[in-house]
Structures are given as C-alpha cells and as structure tokens.
Image (cartoon, helix red, strand yellow):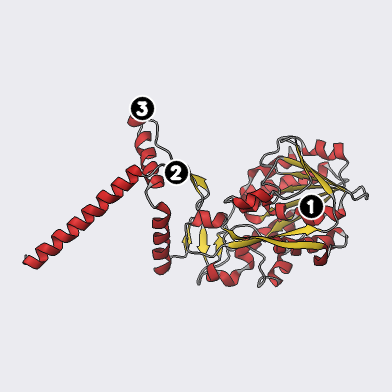
Amino acid sequence: MSQYEKIYKCTMVGLLSLFIGGMFSVNILTPNKTFSYAENRKLEQFPEFSFRNLTEKKFTSNYEKYISDQFAFRDFWISVKSDMERTIGKKENNGVYIGKDGFLLQKFSKPEEQDVKSKIEAINNFHLANPNVKKHVMLVPTAISILENKLPNYVSRGDELTYINKVKKSLDKDINFINIYPVLSSKKDEYIYYKTDHHWTTKGAYYAYQELSKNMKFTSTKNESFNIKKITNSFYGSLYSKAGFRNIDPDSIELYQSKKDKYKVEYIDENKTSTSLYEMNNIKKKDKYTVFLNGNHPLMKITTDNKNEKKLLIVKDSYANSFLPFLLSHFSEIHVVDLRYYNESLNMLMQKNKINDMLLLYNTNTFFEDSSINALSE
C-alpha cells in the first residue's frame, strides 16, 4: 500500500469516526421529542426496563423503535432518503403512489368478497327495517380513479370503480345510489382532490353536492351565495405523513361559508354547542382538515332556521365533514352519525327524531375497510 493510500484510508477512517462520535454526542444531548408533525404521530419514548421485557425481547424491540424515532435530525434524513428514492424512480411507499405534479395517490386495496357482501346486506336490511325513510348512498371515488393522468407510468387505478358498481347493482332497487364519478371526472383538471391528503377538496365536495341536489330534488345553492375563503396554503395531509415522500408542495384549504344560513351545532357526546361548523384554531395544527367539524364525532345534531320540517340523517366518514355545510339551506335538522364511534341504535334515533331522509356518504377506501358499517343491521 502506497503512502498516499495509507493517508487517504486514515483520513476516511478518522472522518467516519468523527461523524459517528459527533452523531452519538448529538443524540445524547438532544431532548426527546414526543410528536412528529411531519408524520402526524406520537414518537417512541425510552422503554421501561424489566427483566421480563428483556427476556421476552420486548425491551430490545421497543428500544430499536425508540432509537429510530429519536435519531438526531430525523426529518432531514427522511427527506434525504425520500429524494434518493425519487431519483432512482421509486413510485410507491406504504400504499401511496407519488404521481405527476407532486400528487400523492392512495392505492386501492381489493376487499374480500365476503366483506363486500356483508356491507351490502347490512344496508339492505337497514332499508327494510325503515321503509318510510328515503335512502341515498354516495360512494365517493378516491383520487386514484379520477386523476388517472397523475398516476406514475405503468400504474393502473385498480378495481375501485368495479367495486363501486358492484355495490350499486346489489343495493335494493328502492335505495337511491348517487353516481358522482361522471361529474368528478369531468372536473378532474380542477383542484378537487388534495395533493398530500386522501380527502377531496371543498370544491370537489361542492360538485358532489350539486349532483346530490338533482337526485334529492332540491335546488342547489349557487357559488355566489357563499363566502369562499382560502384559510391556509400550508396543509400537509395524511398521505404526506403516511408515504414519507418529502419536498412536495403543500395544499391549500378553502371554506364555503353561507352568507345567510343560521344554525346551531350540538356535539351530543361532548355535551357541547356551537354556532359554527368550523374550528378555526385547528389551522394552527398539523391535521388542518379538522377545521371541518373539529374532526369526527359519534353524534351531532345541526338545527337550522329552515322551517320546512325536513330532517336528514347522515351516516358518514370524514369526507362528509367538508360536504355538510352545503346542506344547511335544505333541512331543518341534520343528524350526523359516525359509526366508528357511535354505539346506539340508529333505528331508535330515526324514530325518535322523525327523520325523513338518510344519506350514507363514504369514500370508497373507508367504505370497504370499515367493519362498523355492518352495525347498520343491528
């Protein structure tokens, strides 16, 4: 080995040792973080030591998670990893595709046939148990089905539309299935889905509301009747947190606030009342989408100044949170149930409140993944 090679080798070993030692020191001196805003999750803390945890290998496993979560400059290294993966052409991470123009699109997972059958039976049985209530079902296609032009090359949208059609064909003929794929597809060049989040935007929800109005035979409120206000340009949503891809432009959030509607919102389980469907302080949080309704709740009751005595029950996931404000002009009462958290009888709720109409509104992914929908028939 030449003198030059020896000097080079010693220099590299020295630099590597200095880097490792420096990172070790920084990790020791850096206080533990409790929450990652980029990933929207709690970070692992130092595990409790016990001989039982040690022998069962729980301590070692949890300690590895702790080191990974608390590693110094963790977000920086994740960003570097993300850039390298994108450079070498990686298209997917944790079930999320990175598409064209910085769009993140959630992969559709094919559901088990028995699960699909059980959900359809639950809806049909609920319909038979409540024959005097008009039922409407809206399964919202996710961005992967609408924004095909944003998908990476050689990636297909999957079977989402196939399963939406399967539900449509299997529902009782007296249940009104509202197909919003055509209208959303026709607006795909507009900002109707967030880039970094799995939800539709408020504009996307507005187009679906217009389609609902045709099916439910009421006149939709025009754009001019709303104060449309952009409240943030720095929204990084659920897919950004899930995928780990970084250096992507954030989303903006718009509110469509009625110029004339007056209403009262009751959060039943929280024993709380409000005069707004929006929690504006949540714009300061990581999950800014919770500006709508302050997130999800078991049961809400919205009473409007409309005197038409029309009462609507919405059984929903979080896609409905930005959709609800459009309905205020058309009903005197709106009862909102999230079956993931609601444990009471829907039949009793409908009978007690003399509800006329029911809307089941889910995005397709949640509909096929959420087993709580089977509770409809209980």
Residue at 56% in and 59% down: 106
Local packing at callout 1 (Cα closer than 10 Å; few below 14, some 14-19, many 20+) is some
Residue type, mark 2 in image: Lys
Per the image, label 3 sits on a secondary structure element best described as: loop
Badge 2 or badge 3: first in the primary sequence: 2
Badge 1 or badge 3: first in the primary sequence: 3
Q: Residue furthest top?
A: 51
Q: Which mark is residue 172?
A: 1
* Mark pair 1, 3: CA separation: 58 Å
Given residues 371 and 263, the one toward you in this image is 263
35 over 200 or under it: above or below: above
Q: Quadrant of the N terminus?
A: bottom left
Q: Position of residue 355 (x, y in %)?
A: 86, 44
Residue at 47% in and 57% down: 244
Q: Position of residue 108 (x, y in %)?
A: 58, 58
Q: Is residue 6 left or right of residue 106?
A: left
Local packing at callout 3 (Cα closer than 10 Å; few below 14, some 14-19, many 20+) is few
Q: Which mark is residue 50?
A: 3
Residue type, mark 3 in image: Ser
Q: Position of residue 255 (x, y in %)?
A: 72, 59
* Image quarter of residue 339: top right
Residue type, mark 1 in image: Asp
Q: Which residue is mark 2?
A: 33
Q: Is residue 93 left or right of residue 138?
A: left
Q: Nearer the viewer, mark 1 or mark 2?
A: 2
29 over 247 or under it: above or below: above
